[in-house]
């Protein structure tokens, strides 16, 4: 667990400002997750294979490498990073 102390030299409620920033980051991250999920769904339908199946085949060198498959890998990795970011954002708590 990491604890962070913030000090502001300006009047106003710093907590409200940070909560707003975190809320916007969460909203934006969720939008990214939704877009990635939708793109992956289309790719999976096009290839008639789930991303899990694709990763298994790809890691076993059962597929010929193409730009399209590289994009699929990139989309999967992007989704994973966004999900990790969302989890970190959900874990932020304010202590008094």
Image (tube, rainbow, N blue to C red):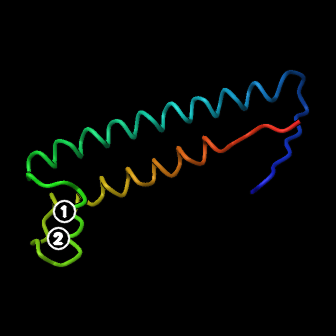
- Residue 39 falls in image quadrant: top left
Q: Is residue 53 above or below residue 82?
A: below
Residue at x-position 45% and y-position 48%:
82
* Residue 19 falls left or right of residue 40: right
* Residue 8 falls left or right of residue 35: right
Q: Are marks 1 and 2 in contact (CB under 8 Å)?
A: yes
Percent position (x, y) of residue 69? 17, 61
Dot 2 alpha-carbon crowd within 10 angstroms: few under 14, some 14 to 19, many 20 or more = few
Percent position (x, y) of residue 12? 86, 21
* Residue 10 falls left or right of residue 26: right
* Count of residue discs: 2
Residue at mark 2? 57
Residue at x-position 23% and y-position 56%:
51
Residue at x-position 69% and y-position 42%:
92
Dot 1 alpha-carbon crowd within 10 angstroms: few under 14, some 14 to 19, many 20 or more = some
- What label sits on residue 54 in the rendered view? 1
Q: Secondary structure at mark 2?
A: helix
Mark 1 vs mark 2, CA separation in Å: 5 Å
- What label sits on residue 39 in the rendered view? none
Q: Quadrant of the C terminus?
A: top right
Q: Name the foreground residue: 41 vs 71.
A: 41
Q: Secondary structure at mark 1?
A: helix
């Amino acid at each position: 667990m990491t604890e962070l102390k913030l000090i502001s030299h300006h009047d106003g409620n710093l907590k409200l400002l940070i909560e707003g920033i975190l809320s916007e980051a969460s909203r934006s991250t969720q939008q990214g997750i939704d877009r990635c999920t939708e793109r992956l769904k289309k790719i999976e339908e096009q290839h008639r294979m789930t991303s899990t199946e694709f990763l298994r085949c790809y890691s076993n060198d059962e597929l010929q490498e193409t730009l399209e498959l590289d994009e699929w890998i990139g989309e999967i990795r992007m989704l994973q990073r966004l999900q990790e970011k969302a989890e970190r954002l959900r874990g932020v708590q304010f202590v008094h």
